[in-house]
Amino acid sequence: MAVLHALKALGVKLAIDDFGTGYSSLSYLRQFPIDTLKIDQSFVRDIVTVHGDATIASAVIGMGNSLKLRVSAEGVETREQLAFLQAEHCEEGQGFYFSPAVDAAAFAELLSATSTAYLVN
């Protein structure tokens, strides 16, 4: 806990990755000085076809937004997933819909080639 607070004091932004799976806990939202919740791809994958996944993703987005945290969705692969996330006010996304995984040089080229962010930013 002390290390996280020290990192935060240095200006480091902290995220809870794969939120909603494994050992993630709602208590982390008030204990840790985090900036971002990352919705696990297991909830994003079937977000437009499985009501439970859509409900969980909406709840995480709403909770994160209410707590003034950034919310990022992992595993965005389709336009329909992106549209759902945008409608729910998810700020960020990552996944093959935007780009396959790339090395550092290709990433720098990708950044210089575009001036727009993929979701809301």
Image (cartoon, rainbow, N blue to C red):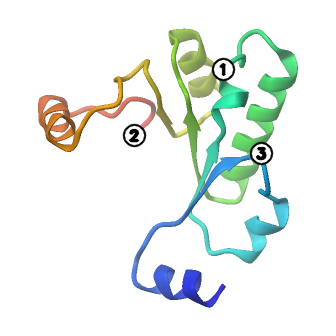
In this rendering, position of residue 71 left or right of residue 57: left
Q: Secondary structure at mark 2?
A: loop
Choose top left, top right, bottom left or bottom right for residue 32. bottom right
In the image, 12 versus 17, the foreground residue is: 17
Q: Residue at x 83, y 28 (%)?
A: 55
Q: Nearer the viewer, residue 46 or 114?
A: 46
Work out whether mark 1 precedes mark 2 in sequence or the reverse, and give the earlier one: 1
User: Dot 1 lies on which element?
Assistant: loop
Q: Earlier in the sequence, mark 2 or mark 3?
A: 3
Q: State the residue position of label 3.
A: 21
Image depth: mark 1 or mark 2 in front = 1
Residue behind mark 2: 121
Where, by quadrant of the figure, is residue 1 drawn? bottom right
* Residue linked to disc 1: 45
Q: Using the image, determine if residue 6 lies above or below residue 87.
A: below
Residue 72's x, y, as percent?
55, 42
Amino acid type of disc 2? Asn
> Which disc is residue 110 wearing?
none
Amino acid beneath label 1: Arg
Mark 3 or mark 1, which has the lower sequence index? 3
- Dot 3 amino acid type: Thr
Residue 17: percent from the left, percent from the top? 61, 52
Q: CA distance from mark 3 to mark 1?
A: 14 Å
